[in-house]
């Protein structure tokens, strides 16, 4: 029985994974538009059953690490890329785990410092901090920041930072209805009850059992960079399996991962973030503007795609530049993925078709077209309704009216065939 038959045997709506799901380790921190762990794990199991020779997996847009963590739990060696330092930290903590022998003592130590009214700490500061945090909350978070910094075990320290992310988001002056940095109403800011200490301590006590035991020999290959830069340095035909959900459009008009992440990043000690270009956190929009489609590009001739050219002709001229910039970057990434994937390797992509100028950008069809031209075969395709992905109901504003976010996504599973030529 082939992979597509296995997938299609499921009941209609099965892959929606509607209802409450046990996210397990992925409850440690809220992150925008995450994959559904149960769905990813089941699909990866099916792929491994059909392809037992697969040993490693790459996610070039790993986000909070759902795909890599679920793949690692099935015995695959994970490799990941993401331009967001916060995503990198969350994923690293989930993959590397913590020192289980030291964690309870570390929790006791940090709790003693936090509840000690005489504990000395330095008040943290960054540009416009008072705009984004109330004064008493700055002091509370500064105290926790100082206490975390005194923890000597690096993997535990990183775990503490991840447990601080949700309180940093909850008690910021930004609205929770959007991932963009929009200020709350003054009454909402002043009415927040400061329970930062309680929530942080609850988090560090609640989640550590979900993490694996830290082992020095466990190799975690994660890069903070745009995907093309890292992919260009990778050995050709070195990856067995690529499993990812690429951006559906430029971050500024889809999901602003960078704006969502930047305030926590400004609180976290840089020594506990992997190496990255500090230009990425120069301002609140730097990460998003450095992501796919973030920098405008000019094209003097049509794409080698009738589908895309027809779409571009259907939208207003002032909307085309962002689509063109995104698609150039998107196709460039797909081209690099083709280079590093082994013959007979598998690519599983979860993609969505967003609206621009009230016209659906057919990213699914464009992805299929791209890989068919490289002689890939489509092993399986499924459609699912999005129920549990944490995405805002409205993602941007066009002509003063909100744009509804997509509620359907597609899973495409391709195989790279050895022979060259067009796929028929």
Image (spheres, helix red, strand yellow):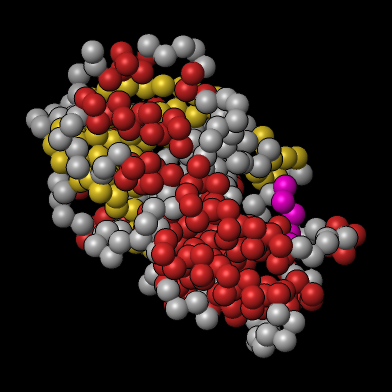
Up the image or down, 322 lies above or below 407; here it is below
Name which residue lies at 62% across and 36% down: 405
User: What type of secondary structure mainly makes up the magenta span?
Assistant: loop
Q: Is residue 79 above or below residue 146?
A: above
State which quadrant residue 244 falls in: top left
**Residue that extends furthest to the left in the rendered view of this protein:** 419
User: Residue at position x 31%, y 13% from top?
Assistant: 5
Query: Residue shown at 79%/75% (left/top)?
Result: 136
Camera-side residue: 122 or 249?
122
Residue 248 percent location from the top left of the image? 48, 41
x and y percentages locating residue 273 in the rendered image? 44, 70
Tell me, yes or no, if residue 5 can be seen here: yes
Question: Horizontal placement of 234 versus 132: left or right?
Answer: left
**Left-right relation of 297 to 288:** left
**Does residue 331 appear anywhere in the picture?**
no
Q: Is residue 18 left or right of residue 155?
A: right
Specify the farthest residue to the right.
187
Report x, y in % for residue 53: 15, 35
- Taking the spot 59% from the left edge, 34% from the top edge, the residue there is 388
Relative depth, front residue between 36 and 364: 36
Describe residue 386's horizontal placement relative to residue 413 as left or right: right
Q: Does the magenta-highlighted stretch encompass residue 217?
A: no
Above or below 154: residue 290: above
Magenta stretch?
171-177
Q: Quadrant of the N terminus?
A: top left
Where is the C terminus found, in terms of image quarters?
top left
Count of numbered tags? 0
Q: Residue 115: where, in percent of width, then height?
A: 71, 75
In this rendered view, identify the residue nearer to me: 174 or 40.
Answer: 40
């Amino acid at each position: 029985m082939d992979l597509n038959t296995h997938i299609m045997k499921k009941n209609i709506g099965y892959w929606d994974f509607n209802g409450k799901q046990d996210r397990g380790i992925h409850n440690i921190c809220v992150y925008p538009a995450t994959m559904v762990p149960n769905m990813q794990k089941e699909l990866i199991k099916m792929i491994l059953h059909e392809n037992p020779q697969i040993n490693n997996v790459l996610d070039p847009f790993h986000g909070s690490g759902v795909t890599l963590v679920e793949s690692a739990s099935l015995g695959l060696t994970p490799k990941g890329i993401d331009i967001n330092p916060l995503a990198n930290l969350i994923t690293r903590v989930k993959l590397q785990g913590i020192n289980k022998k030291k964690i309870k003592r570390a929790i006791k130590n940090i709790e003693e410092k936090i509840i000690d009214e005489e504990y000395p700490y330095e008040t943290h500061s960054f540009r416009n901090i008072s705009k984004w945090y109330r004064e008493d909350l700055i002091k509370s978070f500064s105290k926790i920041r100082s206490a975390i910094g005194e923890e000597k075990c690096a993997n535990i320290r990183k775990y503490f930072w991840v447990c601080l992310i949700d309180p940093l988001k909850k008690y910021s002056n930004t609205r929770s209805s959007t991932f963009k940095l929009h200020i709350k109403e003054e009454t909402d800011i002043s009415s927040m009850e400061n329970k930062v200490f309680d929530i942080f301590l609850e988090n560090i006590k609640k989640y550590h059992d979900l993490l694996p035991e830290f082992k020095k020999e466990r190799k975690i290959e994660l890069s903070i960079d745009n995907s093309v830069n890292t992919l260009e340095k990778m050995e050709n035909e070195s990856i067995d399996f690529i499993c990812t959900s690429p951006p559906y459009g430029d971050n500024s008009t889809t999901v602003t991962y960078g704006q969502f992440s930047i305030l926590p990043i400004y609180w976290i000690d840089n020594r506990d973030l992997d190496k990255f270009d500090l230009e990425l956190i120069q301002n609140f929009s730097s990460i998003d503007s450095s992501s796919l489609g973030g920098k405008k590009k000019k094209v003097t001739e049509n794409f080698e795609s009738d589908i895309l050219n027809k779409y571009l002709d259907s939208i207003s001229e002032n909307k085309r530049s962002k689509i063109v910039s995104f698609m150039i970057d998107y196709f460039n990434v797909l081209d690099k993925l083709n280079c590093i994937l082994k013959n007979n390797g598998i690519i599983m992509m979860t993609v969505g078709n967003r609206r621009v100028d009230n016209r659906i950008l057919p990213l699914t069809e464009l992805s299929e077209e791209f890989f068919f031209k490289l002689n890939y075969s489509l092993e399986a395709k499924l459609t699912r309704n999005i129920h549990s992905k944490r995405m805002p109901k409205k993602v941007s504003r066009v002509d003063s009216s909100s744009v509804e976010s997509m509620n359907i996504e597609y899973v495409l599973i391709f195989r790279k065939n050895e022979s060259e030529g067009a796929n028929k």
